[in-house]
Image: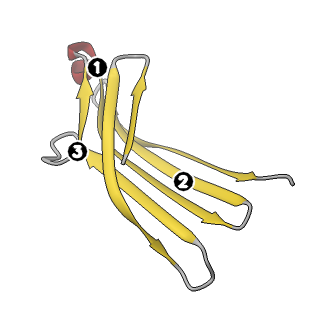
Amino acid sequence: MCAFSIPRGVSLIAGGGYKKAENGEIMFNVTTEADDPDWGIIQSSFMKRKAKTLSFNRKMTILGNTLSYYQETALDIYGKKFNHQDSNTLTKVL
């Protein structure tokens, strides 16, 4: 489960699962959509009208001292739909 709030009036709870590969890599994936019956996206009335979040997906992998993530948020801003993508890799320094 992943839960967070964005200071412009959007909060979400995404859910999913994980799997572990033979090489020890652990992969997490959580998703939600605006009308998801199990998880969800809550938005202020202004955001629903002008800058609605439609869905969210985050994939994280952990292998050794490295954590990587990729996330994608589908948005409808003033009637134009697009996907915002973000990714990064963090490495623990010993």
**Which three-letter amino acid code belongs to the residue tagged 3?**
Trp
Relative to the observer, which residue lies in front, 53 or 21?
Answer: 21
Q: Which residue is mark 3?
A: 39
Is residue 72 found left or right of 46 in the rendered image? right
Alpha-carbon distance for marks 2 and 3? 19 Å
Q: Which mark is nearer the camera, 3 or 1?
A: 3
- Image point (36%, 63%), residue name: 17
Location of residue 18 in the rendering, given as x and y in whole percent from the top left corner? 42, 66
Residue 43 location, quadrant: top left
Location of residue 12 in the rendering, given as x and y in whole percent from the top left corner? 32, 34
Farthest-out residue, bottom:
22
Q: Is residue 93 above or below residue 73?
A: below
- Image point (50%, 67%), residue name: 27
Q: Please give the label number shown on residue 47.
A: 1
Alpha-carbon distance for marks 3 and 1? 19 Å
Q: Which residue is mark 2?
A: 70
**Few, some or many residues within 10 Å of mark 1 (<14, 14–19, 20+):** some
**Which three-letter amino acid code belongs to the residue tagged 1?**
Met
Relative to the observer, which residue lies in front, 10 or 92?
Answer: 92
Q: Earlier in the sequence, mark 2 or mark 3?
A: 3
Farthest-out residue, right:
94
As helix, strand or loop, the secondary structure at mark 1 comes to helix
Q: Which mark is nearer the camera, 1 or 2?
A: 2
The answer to whether mark 3 and mark 1 are in CB contact below 8 A is: no
Location of residue 23 in the rendering, given as x and y in whole percent from the top left corner? 63, 83
**Few, some or many residues within 10 Å of mark 2 (<14, 14–19, 20+):** some
The colour scheme applied to this rendered structure is: secondary structure
Q: Is residue 13 above or below residue 87?
A: above
Q: Earlier in the sequence, mark 3 or mark 1?
A: 3
**Which three-letter amino acid code belongs to the residue tagged 2?**
Tyr
